[in-house]
Amino acid sequence: MAGRDPNRGKTVTTVLGRRLGGELLRLREACALRQAHAAEALSASVAKVAKIERGQVPMRDPDIRALCHLYGQDDETAIGRLLALARADRERRKARGWWNHYPQLEAMVEYVALEDIATNIRTWQLAIVPGLLQTPDYARALAVGNGHWEDPDEIEPFVESRMARQTRLDGENPLELWAVVHEAALRQLVGGREVMREQLGHLLDMARLTHVKVQVLPFLAGAHPGMTSAFTIVSFAEPGALDVVHVDTASSAVWLESDTDAEHHNRLFDRITRLSLAQRNSVRLIDGILKEM
């Protein structure tokens, strides 16, 4: 997956780099300029401009402003979004995170690296409790159940890496997490009743944190707009200002990086939350399922 080695940030693409490059490419094409014009404005080569637009190199703030001036972009709010995107991309590229020591993360490496610098995450899950809210036994049962691991010894490092991710919910500037989970995920006996009792109790504990919001979409909601897939919106500023969307499939992880994709999934998430129980009622439902077990 692109961008998996942060030590090679000057030669590989990243999700944020591709998003920034795509924005600059769109601005250039809108004013009918060639890469040669951009290269002249930056006192750089056409090859470097091509790398910028493919998200292969980090960008300095003066270069972004120079290109915005060339492209006739004088909206300071829009320019500020590009600068924030470039800043987040530079942080991502220079990160030498713990996740690089866990090959078991595989395609999740880029996601975890972005999660580490994100300010806000909103996630909709149909079938499982979100990774940031899982207990070790629940995560272990999922790893065993999906049958992915040929070597059982790889499961424990995977569980360790999942627990390490949860440190983002601690500290002075914790990640803001809004998790919406379908009722089915809470009733599925992952690992058996004892594991699920512990998992549901942990969900109740996490829901008490001021920076964690948990909602449940109940069976009674009927047909809903989130039936086709689960997804996660990762934000690096105020929600909606700078978002990328992560979607898991059976064979790979997909990044949706355009403004159009982000806006679509933000609207989708809003519709799902409106159909879900309020947090207080969600907590009551979780507690009721826990007592049933």
Image (cartoon, grey):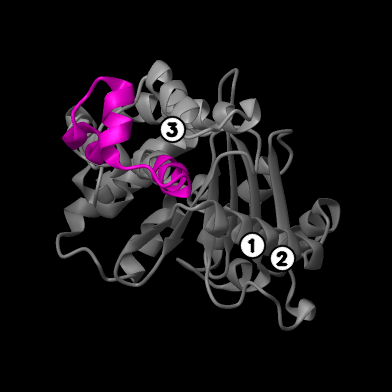
The residue where tag 2 is placed is 272
Q: Which quarter of the figure has residue 278?
A: bottom right
The type of residue carrying mark 2 is: Ile
With 272 as the anchor, is 32 left or right in this view? left
Q: At 26% across and 42% down in the image, what residue appears?
A: 13
Q: Earlier in the sequence, mark 3 or mark 1?
A: 3
The residue where tag 3 is placed is 116
Against 264, residue 38 (above or below) is above
Q: Which mark is residue 181?
A: 1
Residue 269 forms part of the magenta stretch? no
Q: At 33% across and 24% down in the image, what residue appears?
A: 41
Question: Which numbered mark, 3 or 1, is in the foreground of this view?
Answer: 3
> What x and y, as percent, mark residue 270?
73, 59
Residues in magenta? 23-51
Against 64, residue 50 (above or below) is below
> Would you say residue 197 is visible in this rendering?
no
Magenta stretch, main secondary structure class:
helix
Q: Which quarter of the figure has residue 219?
A: bottom right
Question: Which numbered mark, 1 or 2, is in the foreground of this view?
Answer: 2
The type of residue carrying mark 1 is: Val
Q: At 78% across and 63% down in the image, what residue appears?
A: 285
